[in-house]
């Protein structure tokens, strides 16, 4: 599969009565907590299809789960991706990252080797654990959309 010029971010969440828990993942290649993140593939056809594929590959999340597009959009520098500029050209300096939420009915996940562990945590704990601002911004949006009954 050819790497598309975009990234996806997926925020799994679970409702327990009045409470909402968010699933954060510890990366295996660095000391960082984040949501599921991955590259689009040209064959995916859309950012949503990429999000569903990445969620399944990294956490075993079924494509039949309810995915919601978020408005949070950020730019990722291409120097984060090995050989990206060789593939996309020297002029390609940043790519967009599209964010999606996915509501899960249970909290059991099957993580890939990209992560060493996962945790279901409340909003404040997630904000403290997350490393990247884009993840924190998407979390803020999701938390408030849930509170406002938008999701």
Image: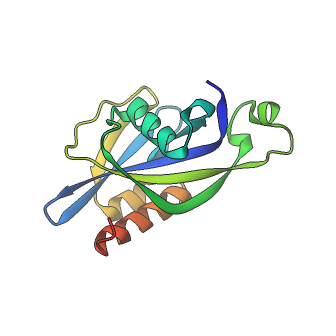
Coordinates of residue 127 in the picture (x, y in percent): 41, 61
Quarter of the figure with residue 41? top right
Left or right: residue 73 compared with residue 58: right
**Residue sitting at 37 percent across and 57 percent down?**
126
81 in relation to 98, above or below: above
Quarter of the figure with residue 26? top left
Coordinates of residue 135 in the picture (x, y in percent): 49, 56
Left or right: residue 68 compared with residue 6: left
18 in relation to 67, above or below: below
- Residue 85 seen anywhere in this rendered image of the structure: yes
Q: Tell me the quadrant of the picture where the C terminus can be found.
A: bottom left
Coordinates of residue 6 in the picture (x, y in percent): 63, 44
Instruction: Give the camera-side residue of 151 and 76.
Output: 151
Coordinates of residue 124 in the picture (x, y in percent): 34, 65
**Residue sitting at 26 percent across and 47 percent down?**
104
**Residue sitting at 54 percent across and 54 percent down?**
132
**Residue sitting at 41 percent across and 33 percent down?**
58
In the image, farthest residue toward the bottom: 148
Left or right: residue 109 compared with residue 38: left
Left or right: residue 103 compared with residue 16: right
Instruction: Give the camera-side residue of 136 and 128.
Output: 136
Q: Tell me the quadrant of the picture where the N terminus can be found.
A: top right
Instruction: Give the camera-side residue of 32 and 37.
Output: 37
In the image, farthest residue toward the front: 45
In the image, farthest residue toward the right: 90
């Amino acid at each position: 599969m050819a790497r598309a010029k975009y990234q996806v971010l997926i925020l799994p969440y679970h409702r327990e009565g009045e409470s909402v828990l968010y699933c954060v993942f510890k990366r295996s290649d660095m000391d960082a907590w984040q949501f599921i993140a991955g590259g689009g593939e040209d064959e995916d056809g859309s950012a949503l299809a990429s999000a569903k594929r990445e969620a399944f590959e990294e956490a075993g999340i079924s494509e039949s789960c309810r995915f919601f597009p978020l408005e949070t959009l950020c730019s990722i520098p291409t120097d984060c991706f090995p050989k990206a500029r060789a593939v996309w050209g020297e002029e390609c300096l940043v790519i967009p990252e599209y964010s999606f939420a996915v509501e899960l009915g249970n909290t059991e996940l099957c993580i890939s080797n990209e992560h060493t562990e996962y945790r279901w945590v409340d909003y404040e704990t997630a904000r403290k654990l997350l490393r990247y601002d884009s993840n924190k911004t998407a979390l803020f949006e999701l938390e408030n959309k849930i509170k406002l009954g938008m999701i």
